Image (cartoon, rainbow, N blue to C red):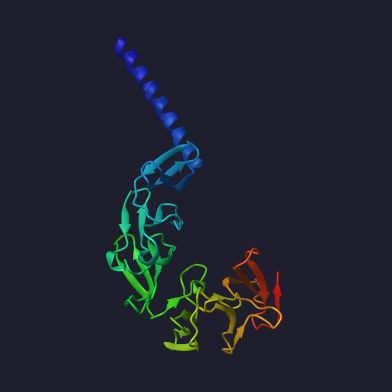
Amino acid sequence: MYITRLFRLSLVLTISLGIICFVGVSIGASIPTTRIIAQVYSYEQDNQHMAIIDVNRNLPTYISFPIQSSGNISLSNNGQRLILPTSALNQATFSVWDIMMGRVVHLPEDYVNCSATAWRWLADNRHVLFQCRDNPQDGTIGGMYTLDFETGLVYLLYNQPTVILDAQWSVDVRRVGGESVLLRGVNTIERYTFATDELTVLLDDFETSILPVLSPNGEWLALVNNDRRPRAYGLNLNTGELHLLETNDVKINNTAWTGWSPDSQWVMIRTTRESIEGNMYYLARPDASAVLQL
């Protein structure tokens, strides 16, 4: 009699626990946990590490990782993998970390002098697209590459002895430049046409100090020369005409940044002034027909 009661009680408890677990799993599936990935700096240990923060449960999980450069972290579309910078400047590299599996894949040592930039995920959440600088002085080759997280191998997509403008990437990061792509050389601006495999020099003997900016309509480039007091120019990509973006009444130098209005009608210019006035801002037509100080 006692054994029968004990058996019934155990059965009831088992069924009750099963129902509770089923309800808990159902609620968890309907309300997914929100997680935040953060870089945390420890003043006591003088190093950085990663943290996964469960927002709903307020549970931080710290992961030791050799991060040497803050920021520029890129999360895959499925929220499972992270691109992490592991060094900076001329030896900029990155590693890829799978949050769920705990696996880390490093960029091969062959690319330590690549100065990797513009890394981003492809739609498959497996391949990382990145660019290498080009520096003829030390023999470093530029180009576009993909790192396969599953195999750890790097594949060359495109290689030319110039730096590729980030603005040439399509929104889905699956194509470059459509029919052609603009290239920035040491002292040239060039266009590479895929169908004909031709490289055309659009502007020669012009060294840029910052990355040129393509207008939204694709017809102009905003350039800044590499003089002691840099000045802004507008390059018409159809005609090859180069315009200094200033007038007799408005002179502009010490240009530090350029951008475009959405309609491609104005170049925005920011300069640094060696005075108490601080930064100065201007608007200029790309053909220099009008220049306004803001």
Residue furthest to the top: 1
State the image quarter where residue 267 is shown.
Answer: bottom right
Residue 248 in the figure: left or right of residue 239: right
Q: Is residue 97 above or below residue 51?
A: below
The reply to whether residue 242 is in sight is: yes
Q: Left or right: 264 with respect to 84? A: right
Q: Is residue 210 left or right of residue 274?
A: left
- Please state the horizontal and vertical placement of residue 90, each as a whole percent of the image: 37, 67
The residue at 40%/56% (across/down) is 69
Instruction: Tell me where residue 123 sits by quadrant.
Output: bottom left
Q: Nearer the viewer, residue 173 or 167?
A: 167
Q: In x, y percent, where is residue 167?
A: 52, 72
Residue 219 appears in the figure: no
Nearest the eye: 114 or 2: 114
Quadrant containing the C terminus is bottom right
Name the quadrant containing residue 222.
bottom right
Residue occupying the point 33% across, 69% down: 113
Q: Is residue 76 or residue 25 the one in the foreground? A: 76
List x then y, in percent, for residue 143: 38, 75
* Image location (x, y in percent) of residue 58: 48, 36
Q: Nearer the viewer, residue 231 or 85?
A: 231
Counting labels gives: 0
Which quadrant of the figure contains the N terminus?
Answer: top left
